Image (spheres, rainbow, N blue to C red):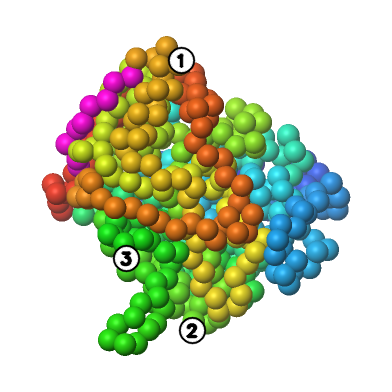
Amino acid sequence: MRMANLVAHCGFSLSPAVKTHSSSPSHGHNNVIRFQNLKSSTSNLNLRPCSKGPNKLFVTRASAAVQGQTNVTQTPLTGGQQASGQSSSRPKKVMVIGGDGYCGWATALHLSNKGYEVAIVDNLVRRLFDHQLGLDSLTPIASIQNRIRRWKALTGKTIQLFIGDICDFEFLSEAFKSFEPDSAVHFGEQRSAPYSMIDRSRAVYTQHNNVIGTLNVLFAMKEFSEECHLVKLGTMGEYGTPNIDIEEGFLTITHNGRTDTLPYPKQASSFYHLSKVHDSHNIAFTCKAWGIRATDLNQGVVYGVRTDETAMHEELSNRLDYDGVFGTALNRFCVQAAVGHPLTVYGKGGQTRGYLDIRDTVQCVELAIANPAKPGEFRVFNQFTEQFSVNELARLVTAAGAKLGLEVQTKSVPNPRVEAEEHYYNAKHSKLSELGLVPHLLSDSLLDSLLNFAVQYKDRVDTAQIMPSVSWKKMGAKPKTVSV
């Protein structure tokens, strides 16, 4: 097991000559650990913190399925689960790609707790981004291996783990063939607009990682899991801020006397958002050409940190980003309020977006899995529960902070982005509600909880991370660091 610990904790540091296969039982379970010498799409970003060798990633596949387990029951059917055509004699298998990330980790635990058989696929690169940029989560987060072990100890439920890069099709193919998922939930992308705008290399990495990774998932489904349902996390940012209502994916128009229903126009505002647009086009095409079944969840801005599962133990804690690269608006404001830093409103503060609690993220994904798309169907759900402007969020945090004895101030800072600061915004979001979504709306009690959580960990806040440091207009080809 010493070799396994080396890979687990040191990332990608084994010698290229090493290729170990072990199938010996451990602790009474049928553990299988493999190390494979595979190419990595991340080599251009030097994602090798422990290695001085060639541009290679070492992939760990760890499986610890419990044979004959009888205490796992399938979640109650919610609407259309019976219509999925899957056998009820076994739990459905869900592969969570990007399951070590903010939304992915919470989703993996939620689905496991609901009785699904879950596997996480992740290359752990999000943790490396923090090391590269000098950033850190407000909450201390355990290694993915310790997280999974703790979940097993608390619940008796096993989560399989595949460590590797989905841009490596050989690795991804083996994961699909080994796990045979009924659904693939795809969070496995570089998710930050500011990160994609740091410099040329990060822009290229974002588009390559996101677009090629998604293409590989689609090919893996076609080759090895034809009935698998893709649940892809998109973004409301694909739509931009048009001066008309935003529909859920499609728009019916009449032009020169003829009428058609077409994909809603996209107005992406960063290289990250553009990668999501490309994803949507590729997925829609493969649904038409190959009969792939897919649901594109255009998600709004997520806030919060706790779910029922992540609150069970400190080793299950989720990450909470408050920096100017990965932090989202409400989470950032709560941390700023907790440490006495003025809330940083970009420009005029009229930027309006859809928001949702992370507890609703996991609920929406479960609903999409339980009510799968038909073969050849490309569905789009707008995944958010409420709309707020940045100024409205600042006022809510200021009021909630006052109740806790916090003197919260707000200041306008130059907007580092290229975006409308005052605009019309009305996005439709009824499809998930029709499937049974019961939202956790932003309430005083929830804000109090999030603020108290930020106060609890305020000693971990690095105030140098708070102010925005990435400019849309000033980015260039020269590699750049964003934190001193």
What's the amino acid at mark 1?
A: Leu
Q: Which residues are magenta?
A: 408-416
Q: Quadrant of residue 347?
A: top left
Q: On screen, 457 above or below 277?
A: above
Instruction: Report the residue that reaches farthest toward the bottom.
Output: 257
Image spot of residue 86 (x, y percent): 74, 69
Q: Nearer the viewer, residue 255 or 462?
A: 255
Q: Residue at x 84, y 46 (%)?
A: 71
Q: Residue at x 45, y 34 (%)?
A: 320
Residue at the spot of label 1: 404
What's the amino acid at mark 2?
A: Ala
Image spot of residue 119 (x, y percent): 63, 54
Image spot of residue 244 (x, y percent): 31, 62
Earlier residue among tags 3 and 1: 3
Q: Nearer the viewer, residue 58 or 85?
A: 85
**Distance between the alpha carbons at the discs numbered 3 and 1:** 42 Å
Q: Which mark is residue 289?
A: 2
Residue at the spot of label 3: 266
Earlier residue among tags 2 and 3: 3
Q: Nearer the viewer, mark 2 or mark 3?
A: 3
At mark 1, the secondary structure is: loop
Earlier residue among tags 1 and 2: 2
Residue 135 magenta-highlighted:
no
State which quarter of the image contains the N terminus.
top right
Q: On screen, 189 above or below 325?
A: below
What's the amino acid at mark 3?
A: Lys
Q: Quadrant of residue 250?
A: bottom left
